[in-house]
Every structure is written in structure tokens, then in C-alpha cells.
Image: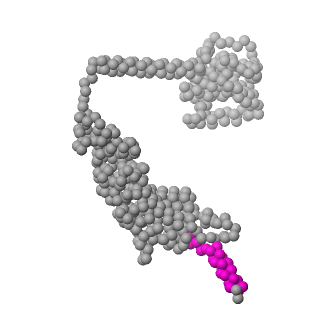
């Protein structure tokens, strides 16, 4: 009988383990995120080989690029869920009021999303308070908070960067709250209700329109490790110890404060700014006293002004001269010697051989240089021949070479009429038909584009053994 009892106990334990490892939590979470784009259930798979589907206790999906709306009713039935982190996504919608009454939920982070609407707190029967300890709803689009009285166990609360408009109620029940951030929530009214938070160590109410007296309308300041009440409409006296502990940035543009910058305790009455050097009063639009500068200061200012003006004028002149010099140098780069057309004579007849800067040479197989006409499509009335090209490039000399390409060298030249051109020699053109070459050049001469040099003309020397292409450079300089 005893053996049978032990067998029954062992069987019940095996059944319990099997039921635990076959949790339905994964199915519930999948249904909850059915309308969420980017969600992958494999993120939640267990690494335990002995238990494939253990209960889900922590749901951390931060920075997963999730978009869409969550069906909260399915998460409510995940019985052991105590932490939810959905921060830094693009989730939207609202959170139902009954969700806060889930008794297992301890940490809840929805920061940096697009949740909106009213944060309403509805507690189910028999559960009058929440187990929540950490609640972060910052950087969303929530517009209102009904009450906080049901969150008696709350230790961390961040509601910053929302559109609350009014201060939440129920602070008196938050006896364990240590961190409160309601900055940048467009809240107006009195800050007095938060004075009941005696356990507070971190307080940020900056960038609102709150009013009140510092420090009487605030929680015990001596317990605080961080304080920021800037960009509000407060008044009051800031003692030396508080100014030293929290720094000037904690009070900047926070209202009309009297700052005690001395270690001595101030008198019962506040002295005026002119009679008490130990107090500094910061108020808006205070008139400034005008002091007449003495003669030495005036002379120094005039001298410095004149020196600065002279230095600036010299600098501008130097810049102008440098610009002019570079501009002239760029122009002179293309100014080879002017061709002398009338007195130019050829000492012999062709063929003509020309040597490049690298030592290579090319040959124009023609007897008379005047027998090869230059067709200027841009200036059809110009009567030029291959002889004019020889003259304009100083006999295709090395000093006229721009570059040496695979198909032939490039030269720079100035044709009659002060026409700056670049001349390209095609050495390997023996298989080109004369009529086909002419038709091709006529088509190319019609091309106009800001990134192309216009084709000004061409010259076919011999029986298409050498083709010279002329492009205009005047638009580039």
C-alpha cells in the first residue's frame, strides 16, 4: 500500500511538470501581437532542452522595430508575467484601464512609442491596488491621468514628454515613490500636490508651466539627490547649500528666485540688491544702469576698431589679389604664342612627322598641308587648312601637348579670331570611310550639353589616315 502511494505521488509530480512545460503562454502572446508588424514568436523560445514551452515571466521586446496595435486582453491571461518592456518601438493605441490590476505585473515600460489617449485606472473587484513598482510611459502621446492612488507600491514613475496638461492626482498614496519625472508634459497649475512624496530622491518637473514657492511647496529637498525645476514659474529663496548641491541648471529660467550665494544664513528680511552683496536677485526685464566710459577706455575702443578695420581691409585686398593672379594664370595657361599666319612657310612637302613629349611620333601622310581643309562647323565661313593647325600648335610641338591618350595626343591652340581650342589627333583611323567620318562629325557637331565640350570642327589629313578633331575651350574659361 505504501508503494502504491509513492507511485501515485510520483505520477502526480510528472503530470505537474508536463503541464508546466506545456504552457499556453506562447499562444496567448502570439494572439496579442497578431496585429503587430515585425513580431517574431521565436524571440521568446526557451533554451531549456527539458522544457520547450515554460511559462513566460518576462516579455522584453525593446528596440525591435515593432509597429501596430496590441491586443491586451490576451496578455492579461499570461498568469506569471511580471515584466513587460516594449520600449523604443512604434507601437500605438491605448492601454485599457483594467490592465493595471494584473496582480503579477511589477515592471511596465512603454517609453518611446506612439501610445495615446487617457491613462485610466480601473481595478477589478477584490483587487484595490496594483503591484506595479516600475512604470515608464515617457515619450508617448498620453493626454491625461485619472488617478495614481491605486499604485501604493510604485517606486519609479516616468511620465515625461507627454501631453498631460494637468498634474495627476493621488500622490498622497505613493508613499514608496523614489523617482518622479513629469518634465515636458505641458502641465500648468500648482506643484503643491507632490509635496506629500516624502520618500522622493529624484524629481524632475522641468519645462512646464507650474507655479508655487520653493522649497515649501516641494517634497523634502534634503532627501533629494537630483532636482530640476527649470523652465517654470516658481518663486522663493534658493539657499547656498541647495544651489551648490543641484547646480545653477536646476533653477535656470525656473521663475523669480532669490539666490543666497553666501554660506552665511540670510536675515529674516531680504535686503535689496544694492545694499546686500551676499544676495543675487534674478528677475526678468531688470533695467541696467548705464555707466559713462572714461576717456582712456574710449580711446582704446577707437584704436582697436581702427586696427580691426585696417586689418580686415588688408585681408580683403590680399584675397582679391590672389584671386586675380590665379585667374590670369589660368588664362595664360592656354595662351601659347599667337600664330603668325602670313609669314609661316613650310620648308618641305609631306608626309609630316611630329614627335610628342614622351618621345613617340605620329605622321600626317599628305604632300601639301594646304590640301587638307579644316571644316569648322561652329564658324563655317572660316577658311582654314592643316597648315593653320601646324602654325597654331607651333608645329605640333611638345610645349603645346595637353595629354597623350591611347588613340593619339591632345594639343592646345589658338586659331585666328582668338579662338581657344583643343585638338585631338586620331592615329588609328585607317579603316574609317571618308563619307562615314564626315556624317559622324556633322552629327557630333549638333550635340549640346553642359558637360560636353562642343565640337568646333575637324580635318581629315590624307585618305583617312589621320583625323584631327577640334573642340572649343572658350566656354570653359
27 part of magenta stretch:
yes
> Is residue 468 left or right of 333 when viewed as pictured?
right
Q: Quadrant of residue 41?
A: bottom right
Q: Nearer the viewer, residue 463 or 167?
A: 167
Tell me the magenta residue range.
3-32
The rendered magenta stretch, by its main secondary structure, is classed as helix
Q: Nearer the viewer, residue 212 or 367?
A: 212
Identify the residue at image location x=65%, y=75%: 17
Residue 129 image offset from top left, x and y in percent: 42, 70
Q: Quadrant of the C terminus?
A: top right
Residue 239 image offset from top left, x and y in percent: 33, 44
Q: Quadrant of residue 472?
A: top right
Identify the residue at image location x=40%, y=68%: 150
> Is residue 93 left or right of 258 when viewed as pictured?
right
Residue 279 image offset from top left, x and y in percent: 29, 38
Residue 344 image offset from top left, x and y in percent: 65, 12
282 part of magenta stretch:
no
Amino acid at each position: 500500500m505504501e508503494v502504491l502511494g509513492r507511485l501515485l505521488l510520483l505520477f502526480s509530480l510528472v503530470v505537474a511538470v508536463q503541464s508546466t512545460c506545456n504552457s499556453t503562454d506562447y499562444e496567448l502572446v502570439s494572439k496579442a501581437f497578431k496585429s503587430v508588424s515585425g513580431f517574431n514568436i521565436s524571440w521568446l523560445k526557451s533554451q531549456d532542452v527539458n522544457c520547450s514551452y515554460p511559462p513566460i515571466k518576462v516579455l522584453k521586446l525593446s528596440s525591435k522595430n515593432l509597429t501596430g496595435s496590441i491586443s491586451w486582453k490576451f496578455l492579461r491571461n499570461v498568469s506569471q508575467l511580471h515584466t513587460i518592456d516594449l520600449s523604443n518601438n512604434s507601437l500605438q493605441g491605448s492601454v485599457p484601464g483594467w490592465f493595471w490590476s494584473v496582480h503579477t505585473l511589477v515592471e511596465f515600460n512603454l517609453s518611446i512609442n506612439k501610445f495615446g489617449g487617457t491613462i485610466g485606472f480601473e481595478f477589478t473587484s477584490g483587487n484595490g491596488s496594483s503591484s506595479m513598482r516600475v512604470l515608464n510611459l515617457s515619450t508617448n502621446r498620453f493626454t491625461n491621468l485619472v488617478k495614481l492612488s491605486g499604485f501604493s507600491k510604485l517606486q519609479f514613475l516616468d511620465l515625461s514628454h507627454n501631453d498631460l496638461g494637468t498634474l495627476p492626482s493621488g500622490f498622497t498614496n505613493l508613499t514608496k515613490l523614489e523617482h518622479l519625472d513629469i518634465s515636458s508634459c505641458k502641465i500648468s497649475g500648482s506643484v503643491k500636490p507632490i509635496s506629500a512624496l516624502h520618500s522622493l530622491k529624484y524629481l524632475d518637473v522641468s519645462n512646464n508651466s507650474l507655479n508655487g514657492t520653493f522649497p515649501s511647496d516641494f517634497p523634502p529637498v534634503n532627501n533629494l539627490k537630483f532636482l530640476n525645476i527649470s523652465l517654470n514659474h516658481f518663486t522663493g529663496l534658493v539657499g547656498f547649500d541647495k544651489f551648490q548641491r543641484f547646480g545653477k541648471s536646476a533653477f535656470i529660467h525656473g521663475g523669480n528666485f532669490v539666490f543666497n550665494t553666501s554660506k552665511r544664513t540670510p536675515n529674516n528680511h531680504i535686503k535689496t540688491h544694492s545694499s546686500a552683496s551676499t544676495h543675487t536677485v534674478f528677475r526678468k526685464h531688470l533695467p541696467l544702469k548705464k555707466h559713462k566710459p572714461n576717456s582712456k577706455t574710449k580711446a582704446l575702443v577707437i584704436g582697436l576698431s581702427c586696427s580691426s578695420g585696417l586689418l580686415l581691409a588688408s585681408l580683403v585686398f590680399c584675397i582679391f589679389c590672389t584671386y586675380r593672379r590665379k585667374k590670369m594664370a589660368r588664362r595664360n595657361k592656354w595662351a601659347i604664342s599667337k600664330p603668325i599666319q602670313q609669314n609661316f612657310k613650310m620648308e618641305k612637302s609631306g608626309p609630316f612627322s611630329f614627335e610628342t613629349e614622351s618621345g613617340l611620333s605620329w605622321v600626317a601622310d599628305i604632300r601639301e598641308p594646304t590640301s587638307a581643309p579644316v571644316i569648322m562647323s561652329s564658324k563655317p565661313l572660316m577658311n582654314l587648312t592643316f597648315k593653320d593647325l601646324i602654325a597654331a600648335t607651333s608645329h605640333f610641338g611638345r610645349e603645346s601637348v595637353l595629354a597623350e591618350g591611347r588613340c593619339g595626343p591632345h594639343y592646345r591652340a589658338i586659331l585666328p579670331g582668338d579662338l581657344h581650342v583643343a585638338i585631338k589627333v586620331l592615329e588609328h583611323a585607317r579603316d574609317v570611310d571618308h563619307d562615314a567620318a564626315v556624317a559622324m562629325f556633322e552629327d557630333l557637331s549638333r550635340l549640346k550639353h553642359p558637360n560636353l565640350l562642343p565640337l568646333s570642327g575637324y580635318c581629315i589629313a590624307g585618305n583617312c589616315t589621320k583625323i584631327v578633331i577640334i573642340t572649343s575651350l572658350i566656354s570653359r574659361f
